[in-house]
Image (tube, grey):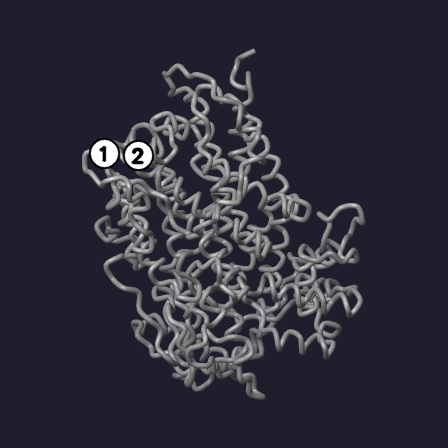
Amino acid sequence: MFTAWNGALISWNLNPDVSLPKETAGRETSPQGMPISSTSQQGSLSCENTEPEEDFSHPDLLESLKRLSLRHFENFSQRFYGRSGSFSLFTDVISITKKSTGNGNMIQFREHFDLQPWERATADAEIPHYVYPDNDLIRSLVAIYFETINSIIPILHRPTFEKNIDEGFHLRDYNFGAVLLLVLAVASRYSDDPRVLADPCSKLSSGWRFFKQVHIFKVAIYAPPCLYELQVAILGGIYAMGTSVPEFGWTMIGVGLRSAIDIGLHRRKPKGNEFTVEDELKKRSFWALIVLDRLVGLYVGYPAMIQDEELDLQTPIECDDEYWEIAPDGRVHFNQPPGEPSKISYFNASIKLSEIMSVVMKTSCSLKKARDMLGLTGKSWEQRLVADLDSSLNAWVDSVPDHLRWNPRCDNGTFLYQSTALYSVYYMLQILIHRPLLRTDSPLSMPSLIICTNAARSCSRILKVHMTRIRTINPQIIVGAFTSGAVFAMNIWSRKRAGCAPNTRDVAGFQVCLTTFEDAADTWNIVGRSLILFRAMASVESPPPRRHENVTVTPAPSIWSSYDAVPQTAFLQSVQPFCEQTPYMDGYLASRMGAGFPLPLEPHLEVSSSVQPSYVAQESGLSGELSIDMWTDAPLGFSFSEWDAYVTSMAPGANERP
């Protein structure tokens, strides 16, 4: 397993032979143990401390420091400083001085800790004056936001948020006002009200009139980041992902993550700490930043900002908003009714899945230098890594709570929506794990191609149900549709080059991905670009030979352009979010894809160890070695820019020298 390579990856706890711990009442789990049951969390909010004492000594020291005379220097004392930094020496001196002299007063040095007058003048000049829409539009957009985004990125407590709006808190606190404006901006993409448009002629301008008022980056940071500023970074990042510069969304998420670390949100609270509403929302905000940083980073090929071994905070408490009992002093007790599934279970499942994302980003998608440092060397390191990552996905999918397991007939719209987002990322991650093995010199290229194809087909089935019943687009669904669509396009191209008609399942799956993009292209820039790219993929009638190809190709029948006519009525006769594999290597696929995948799906074929990969390719609708040859030259990742360049190179004459 991972520990066989220098122990560097042990912290992810991805051993598939170890069952994930279940959450018990009154306790929060660690990042390495995602809650997998719907038991309520009642009673005391403090967690039993099972970590080494030295991991908590520094946060305790910081808490003590705040109670010294330095409490006057709020900007200084409310920040987090790592134990290994030079600041630790300073705090030690303060502590020793207080013990030896009884006086830890540093008031004489206040000049060096307070904000300077010229700095405060700049900070005060930055106080904004926001313009809000009519109250009826505010209420409409807030309701849309909680129905669409907060159920998958739960950073707001709805009763508290709506109470603050009713009391006009956004008119008195500009930080909360910024959160409200960005909630309106994000929700505008799902609204048909013309008042949300900055340009009456373009729905792409939905929400811009709210977004443009909020200054994400401040010139003078005169106070430690507050909860509202973290929420601004998250909401601003989500909105920016749909603009003409989606990469800026990743940058904003990074700023929010830095801010969260600045105030120590990556560390669990010291023993005996009593949790408040703000504490829980800060915790949720931090995990939202982690999940989004990894999701977007994996999609565009950027590194993760923080690794799991660098944080130890608890996961969010699985209690829905309506079951929070908030005391006058802000302390909160969580009373989720026993047996009632929580909407936060989805968030914890996505956090656990993000741990696997982090490993993929640090290994398969990293530089050779990073892999060498992790001991990922030798001829078989990729096979061992992929096997371990597959096993980790198996453990994860087995831990998904029952109410989030895919059920196309689920009568709870929220759980169906959450399940769609969850499995879209799961299948995207499965494809990304096996993508590095899709090359001519890999002995596992064909099994990996089958797994990628089955994952894409499974994802398209889920998207088909989602676009029929829910139709809400979010970043998770976008990345799932894009990754799956790229797999379908490669399969269709390779069969056409081999002189075969495209497999109808792949054509139908591609159509689902295309339809998913068509539905949101007028409000999300990145979706519109993806739609154009996918239509360009569909226009490639005869992909040119790549540099590894040494075969003579017979032109395929021209049916690709007729994908709109593919009958869809039978496409979801038996919807399951699982694969359609052939008998060859059933055991291999079962071990890779988990116990939830029914085997075999083609009972008329006998399982035989003598079945060859070429037969598997034929039965799966793939073109064998020709498919692998095309993947060898395709982008390693699934970012839009890489695939845009790749598809452009497919145009006739694109590779000819002048």
User: Whole-percent x and y of residue 242?
Assistant: 63, 49
Q: In which quarter of the image is residue 259?
A: bottom right
Tell me: 101 left or right of 517.
left
Q: Can residue 423 be seen in this view?
A: yes
**Rendered residue at 55%/50% (across/down):** 250
User: Whole-percent x and y of residue 236?
Assistant: 63, 57
Amino acid type at mark 2? Val
Between residues 579 and 287, which one lies in front from this camera angle?
579
Between residues 462 and 652, which one lies in front from this camera angle?
462
How many discs appear? 2
Determine contact: label 1, label 2, CB under 8 Å. yes
User: Whole-percent x and y of residue 515?
Assistant: 59, 43
Disc 1 versus disc 2: distance between alpha carbons? 8 Å
Q: In which quarter of the image is residue 187?
A: bottom right
Residue receiving disc 1: 611
Amino acid type at mark 1? Val
* SS for dot 2: helix
Which quadrant is home to the C terminus?
top right
* SS for dot 1: loop
Q: Residue 5: which numbered mark, if any?
A: none
Image position of 385 with respect to 645: above or below: below
Q: Residue 616: which numbered mark, if any?
A: 2
Image position of 178 with respect to 293: above or below: below
Image position of 119 with respect to 488: above or below: below
Q: Can residue 261 be seen in this view?
A: no
User: Whole-percent x and y of residue 267?
Assistant: 42, 68
**Rendered residue at 26%/51% (across/down):** 2
Q: How crowded is mark 1: few (under 14 residues within 10 Å), some or many (20 or more)?
A: few
Q: How crowded is mark 2: few (under 14 residues within 10 Å), some or many (20 or more)?
A: many
Between residues 320 and 237, which one lies in front from this camera angle?
320
Instruction: First in sequence, mark 1 or 2: give its number.
Output: 1
**Rendered residue at 42%/62% (across/down):** 349
